[in-house]
Image: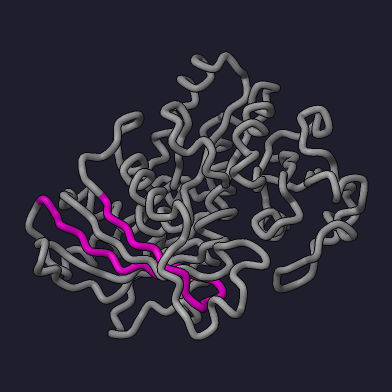
Amino acid sequence: MSKLKAAVLGATGMVGQKFIQLLEGHPWFEVTAVAASERSQSKRYSEAARWLLAGRMPPEVANLEVNPVSPEALKGVDLIFSAVPADIAGKVEEEFAQKGFIVLSNASSHRMDPDVPLLNPEVNSDHIALIEEQRRRRKWDGLIVTNPNCTTTVLSLSLKPIFDQFGISRVAVASMQAISGAGYPGVAAMDIVDNVIPFIRNEEEKMERECVKILGLSGKPADFKVSASCHRVAVLDGHTEAVFVETRKSTDPESVAAAMKNFKGEPQRLKLPSAPEHPIIVRTEEDRPQPRLDRNEGKGMAVVVGRIRREHLMGGVKYIALGHNTIRGAAGCSIMNAEVLRAKGYL
């Protein structure tokens, strides 16, 4: 199988760099082009990007010239990974799709479009069928597929086995989100050290809307409500969520834990390169999961769940879920979406 040529838009930012890091040595895709804002263009990537991640910059990408973020500048690539800011992503990604490009987007601009798949692969890979409707309605040969917000990715994956086996009436969730989720340079030290910030703009709305789209039928949201409260905490990587679920069928913590342990999705059945063997890892210790100890499970692609116990107020269960926000919650999820597209013949 020859490798497909990939371009990364917004390549100098934190998520763009994470795309480049995760794609190094990928068996199906290779980064052959990078694009960024005007101040970086015409420079070598190593000159334009201040490498912010552990380990060295992949040498095969370091010498690439930074291109403009335009379809004309990136002819010859097979797919686009988009890490451009949401305020410009909508128009930019549409331009690429109109020109026939396959766009895998980490931005929020198109997530709630009714004809755009919002994919968390183990949860709703069947939503890929929306691509045909997207192409028909928009009259283009390319396509846009988005991955969810980082907090939604963790939440929806942890809810999937509960939803399938016991049904869900309502969900409440409180997030404790890492500073890397704010991008570089993140949150000012004077704001976050010795502090918790109880507000992240638009985050609660994203969780509440995206989760029911992901867990619904293709084109129809799920029939339950999500109430979210989001908070920034002094953790570098890894979003932690306290989740409270009212189930439609009577259940208990042991049954929910078993459903989570045994859960596997289509990426596991297809043996996709980025798919963790166990998408949900259940910890039984009373004080796990913890970001520093558990965020890299499954190479950062698994969600770790612990403290599963009865929820007495609503009637159901409550638990703690943890996921790596820049891997599973961002670039890694988008890369696995691309793997689904290839496995299903869209690439």
Q: In the rendered view, would you say 161 is above or below 179?
A: above
Residue 35 left/right relative to 86:
right
Query: Is residue 243 toward the left or the right of residue 315 in the image?
Result: right
Which quadrant would residue 86 be assigned to in this image? top right
- Estimate the x, y position of residue 282 in percent, counting from the top left: 33, 71
Residue 32 visible to the viewer: no
Position above or below: 273 against 50:
above
Question: Which corner quadrant of the image does residue 327 belong to?
Answer: bottom right
Residue drawn where x is 55% and y is 70% of the image: 179
Q: Quadrant of the N terminus?
A: top right
Query: Is residue 300 depicted above or below 87 in this figure?
Result: below
- Residue projecting furthest to the front: 190
Coloring scheme of the render?
one colour
**Residue 330 image position (x, y, % from top left):** 55, 54
Toward the left, the furthest residue is 250
* In magenta stretch: residue 142: no
Tell me the residue at 21%/68% (across/down). 318
Q: Residue at x 47, y 48 (%)?
A: 148
Asked if 49 appears above or below 123 in the picture, the reply is below
Q: Picture coordinates of residue 78 (x, y %)?
A: 71, 33
Residue extent of the magenta highlight: 226-248
> What is the magenta segment's predominant secondary structure?
strand
In the image shown, does 25 or 337 lie closer to the viewer? Answer: 337
Q: Residue at x 81, y 27 (%)?
A: 72
Comparing 2 with 51, the one in front is 51
Total labels drawn: 0
On the image, the x and y values in percent for residue 170 come to 19, 52
Residue 220 seen from this side: yes
Quarter of the C terminus within the rendering: top right
Q: For residue 235: magenta?
A: yes
* Horizontal side of residue 223 vs 35, given as left or right: left
Residue 17 appears in which quarter of the rendering?
Answer: bottom right
